[in-house]
Image (tube, rainbow, N blue to C red):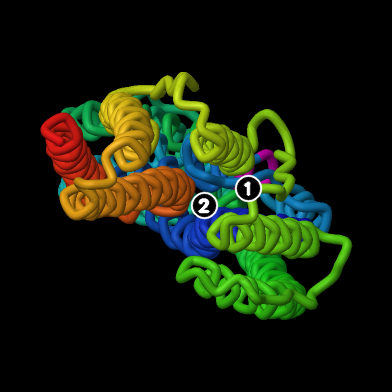
Amino acid sequence: MRKIGIGLAVLATVVSFMLVGIFVQIQQQKGDASVINVAGRQRMLSQRIANRTLMAVAGNTKAAEELQAAANLFDVSLQDLTDGDQELGLPPASPLVRPQLMAVSEVWQPIYENIQLVLQSAAEGAEIQSLMATLAADSDTLLVAGEDLVARLEEQNAESAIIELAVRQHMLTQRIAKAAMLVSQGQIESAPQLAEDVQQFDDALRTLIDGGAGLAPVEGDALAQSKAVLALWQPFQETTQRLLGMAESRAAGLASAQAVVTATESLLAASAKAVTLFEEEASGKVQMLIRFLLIATVIFVLVLAVVIGSIIRIVRPLTDITDVANKLAVGSIAQEIAHKSEDEIGALAESFRQMIVYQQTMAESAEALATGDLAIQVTPKSEDDVLGNAFQRMLGYQQEIAAIMEQIGHGNLVVDVKPYSERDVLSNTVKTMLIRLRKAIGGVQSNAHKLLSSSRQLNQVSVQAGDATKQITETIELMAGTTQQVAQTIGQVALGAAQQAQVMERSRMIVDEQEQVVSRISQGSMRQADSIDAADKVFRGQLAAAIEMVESATLASDQSVSTAVQAAQSGSSAVSKT
């Protein structure tokens, strides 16, 4: 049993380790699934960042918002993958993956900084787009106004130099619009040209209005138109200056956007490698789980085989002991148990062997008691030996009853019988028998006294008969003449004497019969110790018959005595008459 207990404990331990290992592996796989999911999302975010960067730098406000959200999510996810997040079920990165995540972080940091510049540039980009729309509209108006100015100058037959200057103004409006477009698109190299063109346009316009450089101011309608052009130019110039002011940051934003787009390819590759490492790590954990399960299964099978073998070795002797126990249960005590070992089963087998010896000993004692052998010895195993103590008390009880019956058999009718209870059938029966026997013996004694009295009377009759015989003899001697009468009288006396002798003989026989009856009563009393029913039958049958015989003998004795007395009286009367 100890081996089975140890085997079951080992089996339970193996199963517990298997369950714990499976649970841990499942939890790890859940964490691995979350990690791989987040890591895979990082790859997608890298591509979204590149796409939204291009859209945002073009002035798409929604794309800029999506770019900001994607960048923040990528940054937070990268931190969670590295340090873990309990809420998301992400474990800290293992030593295998952490270096790659550090590499991803190194690629990501400059990208994140450039994204902030792109977002800043994207905010200016919307304003630039608005400025470009204003410039486009104003440039057209300014172009028309310049054409009108040239026409007015030609109508006034202005100097060719003035007309040439006005025509140049017309051309500068187109150059300024083109340069502004290039600057708005991030070509910062066009900014100096734009600034130069703006300055040339402004100088030329003021020369037309105020004069200078050897040229007189324009007059009349041309002056009025020049002032109209100036009114259009001033807001256009301010817009152009604002565009030039944002050109540098715009260029930086576009450069950052280009850097982001370029770096996202490296970021994608690094993220993909991290995902691969996560997948390999998860696959390794699965393989480890499989190996663990295989080893645990082998250990489980081996331990189970040991336990089953131990159970079989235990079940076989237990089956034999069970068969013996079943046979003992139906009273077949001639059994043997051969199994011997140092474990609990061996102790059980030894206990059964002792129990079999005990039952066999008690059976032999019971068999001896059944044959009337009260000289056997029964020794209880302990104070708790209920059967042994009860058997010992029963044997003492039988010996006590046998001693009482033996005393009764020897004629001791004053022995005292004390039943243990009302249900003590044997003692109560012996007590009842003893009471009846005492009554019967009392009756016999009474009849014996009567018989003794009759014998005494018969003795007196015999004495009287002897006296009568003596008188007859004397009478014969004295009265020879009455010989015939005396002879007749003697004949009668002889007949009476013969009858008296017969009566005496019958009395002696009756006394012998009474002694035999008393002897048979004593023997019947001893046989009652073997069987209460037989003793009761003997008592009720033989004792009643004996009493009846005693009464009959007594009655016959009384009749004989009466007959003898009558015969003696007749003889005495006859003698007296003679």
Query: Given the image, on which type of amino acid does mark 1 rest?
Result: Leu
- For disc 1, the marked residue is 81
Circle 1 SS class: helix
Q: Is residue 565 above or below residue 316?
A: above
The residue most toward the front is 481
Which residue, given by chain and number where applicable, does mark 2 sit on?
186
First in sequence: mark 2 or mark 1?
Answer: 1
Q: Quadrant of residue 216?
A: top left
Could you tell whether 300 is left or right of 401 in the image? right
**Residue drawn at (57%, 46%) of the image:** 90
Residue 276 position in % (x across, y down) = 67, 72
| Residues in magenta, as a range | 78-83
Tell me where residue 420 sits by quadrant: top left
Instruction: List x then y, in percent, for residue 265.
Output: 63, 68
Q: Position of residue 359 (x, y in %)?
A: 64, 59
Residue in the image at 47% along x and 50% along y: 523
Nearer-the-camera pick, 92 or 234: 92
Using the numbered discs, state the Cα–Cα distance from disc 2 to disc 1 in whole angstroms: 37 Å
Indicate yes or no whether the magenta region holds residue 450.
Answer: no
Q: Which mark is residue 426?
A: none
The answer to whether any part of residue 102 appears in the image is: yes
- For the residue labelled by badge 2, is the local secondary structure a helix, a strand or a loop? loop
Quadrant where the N terminus sits is bottom right
Q: Position of residue 211 (x, y in %)?
A: 41, 27
Q: Are marks 2 and 1 in contact (CB under 8 Å)?
A: no
Compare residues 240 and 145 and report the one nearer the observer: 240
Foreground tag (2 vs 1):
1
